[in-house]
Image: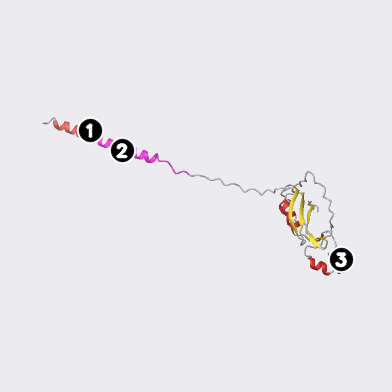
Amino acid sequence: MTARIPISLALACVITFGLFWTMQALVSAEGKLQEGSSSPKIDFVRLRKNKAPQEKKREPPKRQKPEQAPPPPDISMSKASLEPSTDFSSVMSGLNVSDAIADGLVGGAGSDRDAVPLVRIEPDYPMRARQRGIEGFVHVAFTISKAGTVKDVEIVKSQPPGTFDKAAVTAVSRWKYNPKIVSGVPVERPNQQMWFPFDMDN
């Protein structure tokens, strides 16, 4: 009986020591985990320095000359032209009727005359072609109707193709003529041709 007491005390001491050792190990492990936690990271953003603006040198557009410009066709018709705002009535009001008949401007009975231009409008230079320094020409053919208007405008040749076509057709379509007279009757005047040079100097 007396031998059990020392054994019990020794066993109790061992168990108590083991418990304290286990608790100490747990406390020390938790501290290590907390100490090992990563610190917050701080990112630094570098700002670009403002650079002084640089001036860009712009060169004027280089002129593009057409390869070969054909000579203007021979036109037998008169080159007289009037202001765009001039109409047929205002022209005839300032003419003496007898003088006009003698000159062939008014078709009398049995008198013949060719078509006479009344209003001619020059084509506008396309803005895009002017900005790019492009030059060229347009050769058109058209018909003068019995009423003195222009119809059936066609492009015979143009350089560069399609650059100045619309401007030339628009201008020619607004032209006005005294129609051709044959035996006192107005008739159509087909196969009229005109050559328009598009030169930035002019």
Per the picture, the main secondary structure of the magenta-coloured stretch is helix
Indicate which disc residue 49 carries.
Answer: none
Crowd tier of the residue under label 3, counting other residues whose Cα lies within 10 Å: few below 14, some 14–19, many 20 or above: some
**Is residue 19 on the magenta stretch?**
yes
Single out the residue that lies furthest toward the top.
3
Q: Within 10 Å of the Cα at label 2, are there few (<14), some (14-19), or many (20+) other Cα atoms?
A: few
The C terminus: image quadrant: bottom right
User: Which residue was labeled with disc 3?
Assistant: 101
The answer to which of 98 and 30 lies nearer the viewer is 98
- Residue 47: in magenta span: no
Q: Which residue was labeled with disc 1?
A: 14
Residue 27: image quadrant is top left
* Residue shown at the point (22%, 34%) measured from the top left: 15
Amino acid, disc 3:
Ile
The residue carrying mark 2 is 26
Q: Residue at x 19, y 32 (%)?
A: 11
Q: Position of residue 127 (x, y in %)?
A: 72, 54
Q: Nearer the viewer, mark 3 or mark 2?
A: 3
Counting from the top left corner in percent of width and height, residue 43 is at 50, 44
Which label sits in the foreground, 1 or 2?
2
